Amino acid sequence: MNKWKWTAAALMMILLLVMNLLIFDKKESSAIEAPRLKTVISKEHDFIKKWDVTGTAQSKNTFHIYYDPSRGTIREIAVSKGETVTSGQTLLTYENAEIEKELRELNREKEAADVRADHYSSQISEWEREISSFDEKKDNADAKVMLQQQLAEAELQKSLAENESSVLTDGITELTKQVEDLSVKSPADGVVSEVNETHGDEPILTIVGQGNFELKAIIDQNVARVVKTGKSVQIQSPNNKKKLKGTVQTVLPTDKDQTFSMTVLVEEEADWVEGQPATIIISETLAENAVSIPEKSVFTDNGSQYVWILVKEKVYKIKVKTGLRQGGVVEINKGLKKGQVVVLNPSPVFVSGQPALTK
């Protein structure tokens, strides 16, 4: 019986020893197992700040139509505000009683001159027939002389009538042109932005031509220090889905302290309306080609900032100095170079020189 007890006790001791060895091996394996890490490559990145200002569209092709008293009085304004017009389209017409009366008289005089010219042309034909059929032997010589005199007179009167008709034609052409000038045509394709029927010293009509629009905006000194003449900007208009290109034309101080007037030329064709608002997007480069990594790669220890880098499948803790932060990306001013492998999920339990594997 004692023999079996000692045998059982020995077996129990052996079993416990094996179990302890297995547990010890497992703990040792866990302690030296290399962690699997997410990594990222440090890259160059531009940090840019956007400034949005509101501008108002103004056409550089704006045409003002003023009242011209030398043409007479306004008979009709043929367009209305907001109407789209084409180049050469009639905008308004004048009436000038004196020109129209003179034109009617000239037309009547010309008709009379043409009638006389036709009359004497018929007489010339008649006298020429009689002279050609004149018989020197049978007819009186004095009769022939009279026919020749009548022919010469008819030719003279015809010439005078034709000359008068030509002069009157020139006069009618000139007056007709003046009458045509009583109709004012649109100087360009565009939109009627203003109609002023009472006019006075103001324009009767204002036509905003298509294309060559510029935006005017009032900006403060913070924006003014960023923009310069010739700087490219983006333009966002409610009427256009895509952003348009623009160029800063002028930046001038206003009468109000610390404000400036900025004009931006729209470089692309688009549908604009005078006075239409649009957003001018100005980009300010804060840092160019800066070494950067995701913000979550940086951790703080005792007031200092660190990152873990991976070199030959081992992790190393290095101190860094950060700068700008934007959109989850941080600028590294010191301690890190472009192209280094940085641990994306750092842990305070890492040990420098510790083996690691990437996922």
Image (tube, rainbow, N blue to C red):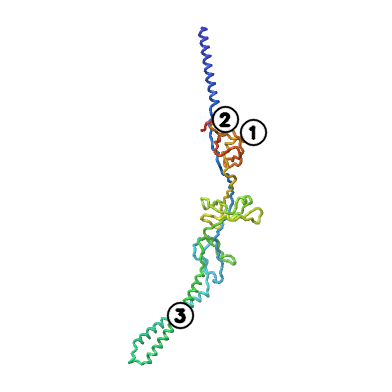
Q: Amino acid at mark 2?
A: Gly
Q: Nearer the viewer, mark 3 or mark 1?
A: 1
Element type at mark 2: loop
Disc on the earlier residue, 3 or 1: 3
Q: Is residue 322 left or right of residue 359?
A: right
Residue named by callout 3: 163
**Closer to the N terminus: mark 3 or mark 2?**
3
Which residue position holds label 1? Answer: 302
Is residue 121 placed above or below 19 in the rendered structure? below
Q: What element does badge 1 sit on? A: loop
Residue 117, x across and y down, in percent: 42, 81
Task: Give the camera-side residue of 136 and 158.
Answer: 136
**Which label belongs to residue 353?**
2
Q: Amino acid at mark 3?
A: Asn
Is disc 3 placed on a helix, strand or loop?
A: helix
* Pair 3/2: label in front: 2
Assess disc 3: are there few (<14), some (14-19) or many (≥20) residues with their C-alpha within 10 Å of its C-alpha. Answer: some
> What is the CA distance from the residue labelled 3 to the residue labelled 2?
116 Å
**First of labels 1, 2 by sequence position:** 1
Residue 237 in the image: above or below residue 357? below
Q: CA distance from mark 3 to mark 1?
A: 113 Å
Which mark, by number, is residue 356?
A: none
Amino acid at the residue labelled 1: Asn
243 or 132, which is in the foreground?
132
Residue at 56%, 69% in the rendered image: 68
Horizontally, residue 212 falls left or right of residue 161, namely right
